[in-house]
């Protein structure tokens, strides 16, 4: 499990696509927007992959505050949906955009569900690198 979590957390490192022109993805562990992007990338991979439920739980424990984990569990019981994704299914793609920093980091996570459907989530992270809020901002067409 620790090896899987370590691999999942390494998403912010440079990667190269094998088809077409080379692409790179970069980040740094001290940057909260990178951490939010790493969390969403690893979480979506975990819930998509067969048997990834345990990894998804471990990612929640690592990235979410304990209080927010409880809040999210209550939201999920009430809404019968995944609280991290605020949906019952898994998106095809995701993008994280910095939305400003004050005493914490706020980012907008855009989830793509189909060619014409996206949703946006507002994700707040403490300076100590823990997510303490995920909320919806609505659904819009691409």
Image (tube, rainbow, N blue to C red):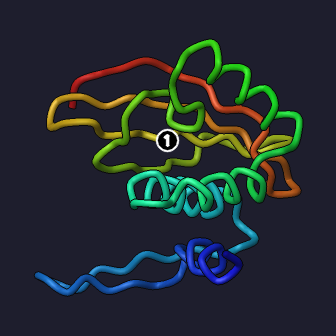
Closer-to-camera residue (35/103) = 35
Q: State the residue position of label 1.
A: 109
Asked if residue 7 lies left or right of residue 19, the reply is right
- Please state the horizontal and vertical placement of residue 59, each as a whole percent of the image: 67, 58
State which quadrant residue 58 falls in.
bottom right
- Above-or-below relation of 106 to 57: above
In this view, which residue lies farthest toward the left?
A: 20
- Above-or-below relation of 49 to 66: below
In this view, which residue lies farthest toward the top?
A: 78
Q: Quadrant of the N terminus?
A: bottom right
Going 37% across and 41% down the picture, which residue do you hit? 90
Asked if residue 120 lies left or right of residue 123, the reply is left
Closer-to-camera residue (60/132) = 60
Q: Quadrant of the C terminus?
A: top left
State which quadrant residue 54 falls in.
bottom right
- Please state the horizontal and vertical placement of residue 2, each as a whole percent of the image: 71, 78
Asked if residue 99 lies left or right of residue 126, the reply is left
Closer-to-camera residue (5/31) = 5
Q: How many marks?
A: 1
- Please state the horizontal and vertical placement of residue 30, each as a whole percent of the image: 75, 71
In this view, which residue lies farthest toward the front?
A: 51
Going 65% across and 79% down the picture, which residue do you hit? 6
Where disc 1 sits, the SS reads strand
Q: Residues within 10 Å of mark 1 (few under 14, many from 20)?
A: many
Asked if residue 14 lies left or right of residue 19, the reply is right
- Please state the horizontal and vertical placement of residue 71, each as a whole percent of the image: 78, 26
Going 55% across and 74% down the picture, which residue do you hit? 12
- Above-or-below relation of 96 to 118: below
């Amino acid at each position: 499990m620790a090896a899987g979590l370590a691999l999942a957390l390494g998403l912010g490192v440079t990667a190269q696509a094998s088809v077409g022109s080379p692409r790179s993805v970069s980040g740094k562990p001290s940057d909260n927007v990178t951490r939010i992007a790493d969390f969403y990338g690893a979480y979506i991979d975990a819930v998509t992959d067969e048997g990834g439920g345990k990894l998804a739980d471990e990612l929640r424990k690592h990235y979410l505050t304990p209080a927010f984990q409880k809040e999210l569990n209550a939201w999920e019981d009430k809404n019968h949906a995944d609280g991290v994704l605020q949906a019952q299914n898994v998106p095809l793609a995701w993008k994280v955009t910095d939305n400003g920093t004050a005493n914490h980091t706020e980012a907008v996570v855009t989830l793509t569900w189909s060619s014409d459907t996206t949703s946006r989530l507002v994700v707040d992270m403490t300076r100590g690198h823990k997510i303490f809020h995920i909320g919806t901002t609505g659904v819009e067409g691409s």
